[in-house]
Image (cartoon, rainbow, N blue to C red):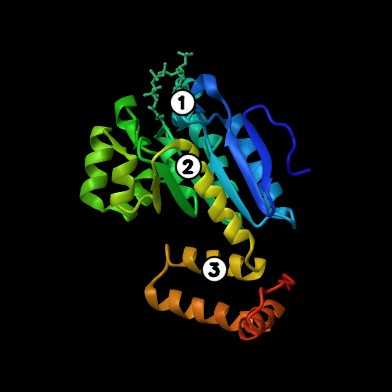
C-alpha cells in the first residue's frame, strides 16, 4: 500500500489523486538522516508507481521543513568512508527519476540539505516566516546536495556566493522575491493547503500530459535552448498519439469537462 507506516515520515492520501509526505523527525527538526531518506525514496517511488496518484506534496512541520543533513551522522565520517559509500547518493538516486510532480510546502527551517531538498521539488511554496539557508560553511563543509548549483541557477551567482560563503539565512519573503518560491503564504497551514490545492488541480489533468509537461520543463534545466526546443516539439507531437489529446480537445469544443482515459 502507498500509505504504509514509516519511522521518520508520515504518508497520507488527503484528496483524490494527491499523495502527501510529511517529514516527521520532530526531535531532530527533521534532520535528513540516511534512514529518513531511504523511507522518503520508498514513499516517493510507491506514489510514482501508484495509478491513482498524480501529484505529490512534500512538507515538514511548522517549525522545520528540514534542518539539513544529519550532523550527528556526519560528524565522524572520513573522506574514504564518504567516498567509498558515496555518502548521500540516496538523495539523488530516486527524486530525479520521479515522474509525477512534487510540490514542496516549506515552513520553518529549510537549511542545508533541507533547502537543497526543497529545491529538488518541481514547485516550491513556502510561508513568509520560513527560513532558508546553506549554513554548511559554518560546519567546515560546503553544500553537498545541489545547493551550489540549483540555488545559484535560481538566484544568480552574487547572491548565491554571499549566502553560501557566509551561511546567512534568507526568508520566505525573499524566496518569493527571488523566484525560489512560486508562492508565499501567510501561515504554515495556508502553505500546506495551497500546495494540496495545486496538487489537486494537477491531479485533475491527464496523467500523460502531466508527465510530459514535467519532463520537458526539466529538460530546460540542463540542455541548450535549441536542443530543449527540439525535445519539446517531439514530445508535443507525440501527444497527438494519445487518446487524452482527442478527449481534451473534443471536450473543449463540446463545452464539457474532459473525462481522461490516461491513455
Ligand atoms: N542534524 C542533526 N541534528 C539536528 C540538526 C541537524 N542538521 N539540526 C537540528 N538538530 C537537532 C539538534 O541537535 C537538537 O537536538 P538535541 O535536542 O539532541 O540537542 C534538536 O535538533 C533541536 O535543535 P536546536 O536545539 O538547535 O533547535 P533551535 O530551535 O535552537 O535551532 C536551528 C534550530 C537554527 C535549525 C539549529 O538546530 C541549527 O542550526 N541546525 C543545524 C542547521 C545546519 O547547519 N544544517 C546544515 C547541515 S549540513 C548539510 O545539510 C550538508 C548538505 O548539504 C547535504
Q: Is residue 116 above or below residue 80?
A: below
Establish whether ligand 1 lies closer than 8 Å to the Cβ of label 2: no
Mark 1: which secondary structure? loop
Percent across and percent down for residue 53 are: 69, 54
* Distance Cα–Cα, label 1 vs label 3: 41 Å
Q: In this figure, which residue is indicated by the disc labeled 2?
A: 190
Residue visible at 71% across and 71% down in the picture = 260
**Residue at figure coordinates x 48%, y 63% from the top left:** 218
Q: Residue furthest right?
A: 1
Q: Residue at x 72, y 72 (%)?
A: 259
Describe residue 210's horizontal placement relative to residue 80 as left or right.
Answer: right
| Mark earlier in primary sequence (2, 3) | 2
Query: Label 1 CB, ligand 1: below 8 Å?
Result: no
Q: Nearer the viewer, residue 132 or 91?
A: 132
| Residue 117 seen | no
Circle 2 Cα neighbour tier, 10 Å, few/some/many (<14 / 14–19 / ≥20): some
Q: Which residue is mark 3?
A: 213
Residue visible at 69% across and 31% down in the picture: 6
Q: Is 185 left, or right, of 211 in this rendering?
A: left
Q: Are marks 2 and 3 in contact (CB under 8 Å)?
A: no
- CA–CA distance in space, label 2 to label 3: 26 Å
**In this orientation, which residue lies closer to the viewer: 205 or 224?**
205
Q: Is residue 31 visible?
A: yes
Dot 1, how many residues are within 10 Å of its Cα: few (below 14), some (14-19), or many (20+)?
A: few
Residue to which mark 1 is pinned = 78
Quarter of the picture containing the C terminus is bottom right
- Secondary structure under badge 2? helix
User: In the image, ligand 1 is in what quadrant?
Assistant: top left
Amino acid at each position: 500500500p502507498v500509505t504504509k507506516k514509516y519511522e521518520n515520515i508520515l504518508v497520507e492520501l488527503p484528496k483524490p489523486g494527491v499523495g502527501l509526505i510529511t517529514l516527521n523527525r520532530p526531535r531532530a527538526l527533521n534532520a535528513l538522516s540516511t534512514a529518513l531518506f531511504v523511507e522518503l525514496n520508498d514513499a516517493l517511488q510507491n506514489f510514482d508507481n501508484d495509478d491513482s496518484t498524480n501529484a505529490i506534496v512534500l512538507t515538514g512541520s511548522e517549525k522545520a521543513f528540514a534542518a539539513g543533513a544529519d550532523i550527528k551522522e556526519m560528524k565522524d565520517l572520513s573522506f574514504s568512508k564518504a567516498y567509498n559509500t558515496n555518502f548521500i547518493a540516496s538523495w539523488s538516486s530516486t527524486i530525479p527519476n520521479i515522474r509525477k510532480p512534487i510540490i514542496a510546502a516549506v515552513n520553518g527551517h529549510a537549511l542545508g540539505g533541507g533547502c537543497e531538498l526543497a529545491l529538488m521539488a518541481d514547485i516550491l511554496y513556502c510561508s513568509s516566516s520560513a527560513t532558508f539557508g546553506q549554513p554548511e560553511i559554518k560546519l567546515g563543509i560546503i553544500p553537498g546536495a545541489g545547493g551550489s548549483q540549483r540555488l545559484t541557477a535560481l538566484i544568480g551567482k552574487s547572491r548565491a556566493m554571499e549566502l553560501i560563503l557566509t551561511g546567512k539565512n534568507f526568508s520566505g519573503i525573499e524566496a518569493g522575491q527571488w523566484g525560489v518560491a512560486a508562492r508565499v503564504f501567510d501561515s504554515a497551514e495556508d502553505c500546506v493547503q495551497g500546495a494540496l490545492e495545486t496538487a489537486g488541480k494537477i491531479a485533475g489533468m491527464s496523467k500523460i500530459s502531466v508527465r510530459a509537461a514535467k519532463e520537458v520543463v526539466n529538460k530546460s534545466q540542463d540542455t541548450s535552448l535549441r536542443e530543449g526546443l527540439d525535445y519539446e516539439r517531439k514530445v508535443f507531437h507525440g501527444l497527438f498519439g494519445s487518446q487524452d489529446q482527442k478527449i481534451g480537445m473534443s471536450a473543449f469544443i463540446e463545452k464539457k469537462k474532459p473525462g481522461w482515459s490516461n491513455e
